[in-house]
Image: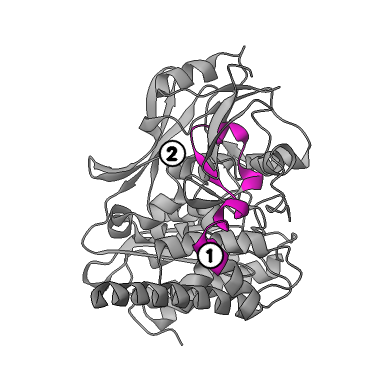
């Protein structure tokens, strides 16, 4: 029978995790892990349940950033006034992850650590310029979220480290954010394509442009060529067309059970076009 | 009973579970407690047939390991249809034709109950959101939406009647 650890303090969890003798796998909402365990008809020898650790939950404003504990559920994130005010695109996407049953259990830290290229919150975190605070035996360190996914399902987490919280810079006066997800249906759909845009719009000009996209590469990715094309520009219909074409050209999606490379490339281009039109304050034709 | 047994409440009753801590809540409900109203559909959190309430919130019981129900309250379709409100909800499903093969029905009833406790007068969009995590392959959902609307209307009418009786006394 599996050994279960249920620490209440983060320090305790890190000690247990750093001890190779325990070999415990950290768990939170289990919406990914229990599917894997059940399909393989196996259970890990030891687990470390993080849900009892108060320090890993909650949403606060600290040092110019929104800080979201790793074990905060998407239900809590989607209904948070703070998230709605400072990161509305994240609140919006939280409400599209699975449905109520999943949102009540799934956590943002779990979504990040699971590191699926289709993880719904991940492109939004890229677009919002998020950072991750990682806690390990040597203390805490902060990494830019865009440096976290190092390859297909590979992350920058060192042995013995946990994701403690996500930091998102507070939205400024001119901030603009948008996210679009395309799946088979509205609820309970894994994305065929998901893309998010974050930027400032002082005087209508796009600055600090970040675009994050999911399900179009082995990891969630920034669309750097499209970002460069938009940077400093005043959006209009022509720029929107060019940005869409650029986005479709700079990704290398694959055919899989959910969609085809060709469809993903096309839809990504159209979604980027639409977001740029939205940023221009134009009606989408 | 081992000292490591997991204490929790099941449909209001205190329980101690001393089996595998990573067993799925779904399997324990059906096989250990004999509560077979909770159905297994996909076993991966897609279909909602196994929906139960955990501290009042709907979750897929196929995705909850037993250790995480410790000190919490699990309510299944059996518990949630045992009172007058639950019975009225079930009756509304029958009357509106919201049941065909029945495999999804317990999960949808649990989701609908959670919705009505939170929002007694939901509109169509809110009902659709609440049952978004429950797949039905028979009804096309229209009669399910009608059933939930009917149950909500009936509940509001009863409340209005009760208020009228109070004021006429």
**Circle 1 is placed at which residue position?**
B112
Say if A70 sits above or below B153 in the image: above
Chain to which mark 2 belongs: A
Q: Position of residue A23 (x, y in %)?
A: 63, 19
- Please report the bounds of the magenta region as a residue range: B61-88
Residue under numbered circle 2: A70
Write down the chain letter for disc 1.
B
| SS class, disc 1 | helix
Which residue is the extreme one toward the right?
Answer: A41
The answer to whether the residues at label 1 and label 2 have Cβ atoms under 8 Å apart is no
Q: How far from the left and from the top, in percent, is residue B77?
A: 61, 55
Picture residue at 73% right of the left edge, 63% below the top: B103
B143 shown above or below A172: below
Q: Are marks 1 and 2 on the same chain?
A: no
Q: Is residue A216 left or right of residue B72?
A: right
Of tags 1 and 2, the one toward the viewer is: 1
Q: Quadrant of residue A87?
A: bottom left
- Which percent across, then down, holds residue B33? 69, 39
Q: Residue at x 54, y 75 (%)?
A: A270
For label 2, the SS is loop
> Is residue A188 shown to the viewer in this render?
no
Q: CA distance from mark 1 to mark 2?
A: 30 Å
Q: Which residue is at the front of the view, A49 or A182?
A: A49
Residue A143 part of the magenta segment: no
């Amino acid at each position: 029978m599996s050994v279960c650890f249920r620490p209440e303090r983060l320090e305790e969890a890190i000690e247990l995790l750093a001890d190779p003798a325990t070999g415990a796998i950290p768990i939170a909402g289990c919406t990914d892990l229990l599917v894997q365990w059940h399909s393989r008809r196996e259970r890990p020898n030891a687990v470390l349940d993080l849900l009892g650790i108060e320090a890993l939950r909650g949403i606060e404003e600290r040092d110019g950033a929104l800080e979201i504990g790793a074990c905060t559920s998407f239900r809590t994130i989607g209904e948070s006034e703070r998230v709605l005010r400072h990161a509305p695109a994240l609140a919006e996407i939280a409400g599209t992850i699975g449905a109520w049953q999943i949102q009540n259990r799934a956590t943002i830290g779990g979504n990040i650590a699971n590191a699926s290229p289709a993880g719904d919150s991940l492109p939004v975190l890229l677009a919002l310029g998020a950072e991750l605070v990682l806690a390990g035996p040597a203390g805490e360190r902060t990494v830019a979220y865009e440096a976290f996914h190092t390859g297909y399902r590979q992350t920058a987490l060192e042995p013995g480290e946990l994701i403690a919280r996500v930091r998102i810079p507070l939205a400024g006066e001119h901030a603009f954010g948008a996210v679009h997800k395309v799946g088979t249906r509205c609820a309970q759909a894994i994305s065929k394509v998901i893309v998010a845009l974050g930027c400032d719009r002082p005087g209508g000009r796009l600055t600090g442009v970040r675009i994050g996209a999911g399900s179009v590469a082995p990891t969630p990715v920034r669309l750097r060529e499209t970002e460069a094309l938009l940077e400093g520009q005043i959006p209009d219909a022509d720029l929107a067309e060019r940005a869409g074409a650029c986005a479709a050209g700079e990704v290398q999606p694959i055919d899989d059970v959910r969609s085809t490379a060709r469809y993903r490339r096309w839809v990504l281009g159209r979604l980027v076009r639409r977001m740029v039109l939205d940023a221009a304050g134009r009606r989408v034709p | 009973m081992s000292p490591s047994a997991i204490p929790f409440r099941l449909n209001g009753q205190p329980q101690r579970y001393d089996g595998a801590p990573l067993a799925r809540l779904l399997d324990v409900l059906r096989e250990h407690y004999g509560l077979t109203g909770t159905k297994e559909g996909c076993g991966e959190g897609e279909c909602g047939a196994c929906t139960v309430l955990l501290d009042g919130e709907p979750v897929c019981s196929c995705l909850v390991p037993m250790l995480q129900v410790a000190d919490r309250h699990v309510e299944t379709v059996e518990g949630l249809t045992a009172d007058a409100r639950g019975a009225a909800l079930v009756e509304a499903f029958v009357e509106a034709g919201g049941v065909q093969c029945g495999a999804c029905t317990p999960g949808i009833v649990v989701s609908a109950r959670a919705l009505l406790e939170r929002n007694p007068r939901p509109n169509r969009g809110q009902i659709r959101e609440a049952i978004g995590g429950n797949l039905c392959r028979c009804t096309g959902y229209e009669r399910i939406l009608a059933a939930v609307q009917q149950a909500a209307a009936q509940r509001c009418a009863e409340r209005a009647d009760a208020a009228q009786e109070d004021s006429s006394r």
